[in-house]
Image (cartoon, helix red, strand yellow):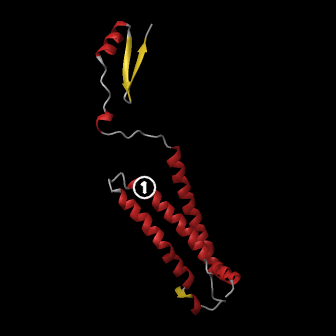
Amino acid sequence: MSQRNFFAELKRRNVYKVAVAYAVVAWLLIQVTTQVFPFFEIPNWAVRLVVLLLILGFPVALIPAWAFELIPEGIKREKDIDPNESIARTTGRKLVGITVALAVIAAVLLAFQFLRPKIATTTGAAATPAPLTASVARSAVDQKSVAVSWRGRIIHLTFL
């Protein structure tokens, strides 16, 4: 089989479309795990495991795309299907539609991740406001001013 025929056969069997759909779904799953796992205090090695399993699953997803075809009667081996009976074109369109829908969902999640307001996540002693020193407190009273501790910094406001 020549290289040109090989790539034409990949296209005819929808292997490219399966690869793109797998990549979109894998990226979406990675985004969900990186956002949800810390919320449930699942360790970082679990996120790495999900990514590794998705990478290892890529060739596993492509092999059935090459060897099998989806027809109205179900899944059949590609070599058992008459070329006139093949509906790879229709199946490919459905696969493209699903991939586009998942890509839109992924894009919305990505936009949400970048556009949402950043919330400071501080824990422990850093979360409590820093105490005012005696000299700042006394000078604040003497000068009719207010000292406020915000994010570990003392902001001193003087009123005239």
**Residue 31 at x, y = what percent?**
47, 57
| Above-or-below relation of 65 to 108 | below
Q: Which quadrant, please, contains the N terminus?
A: bottom right
The residue at the point 57 percent across, 62 percent down is 101
Q: Which residue is mark 1?
A: 34
Q: In this rendering, would 112 be left or right of 87?
A: left
Visible residue check, residue 122? yes
**Residue 37 at x, y = what percent?**
37, 56
Instruction: Locate residue 47: give its quadrant.
Output: bottom left
Q: Nearer the viewer, residue 61 or 53?
A: 53
| Above-or-below relation of 7 to 105 | below
Visible residue check, residue 71? no
**Residue 129 at x, y = what percent?**
32, 28
**Residue 11 at x, y = what percent?**
65, 78
The residue furthest right is: 4
The residue at the point 53 percent across, 57 percent down is 106
Q: Secondary structure at mark 1?
A: helix
Q: Which quadrant, please, contains the C terminus?
A: top left
The residue at the point 46 percent across, 40 percent down is 118
Badge 1 crowding class, 10 Å Cα cut-off, few under 14, some 14 to 19, many 20 or more, is some
The residue at the point 29 percent across, 15 percent down is 134
Number of numbered discs visible in the structure rendering? 1
| Above-or-below relation of 58 to 28 | below
Amino acid at dot 1: Thr
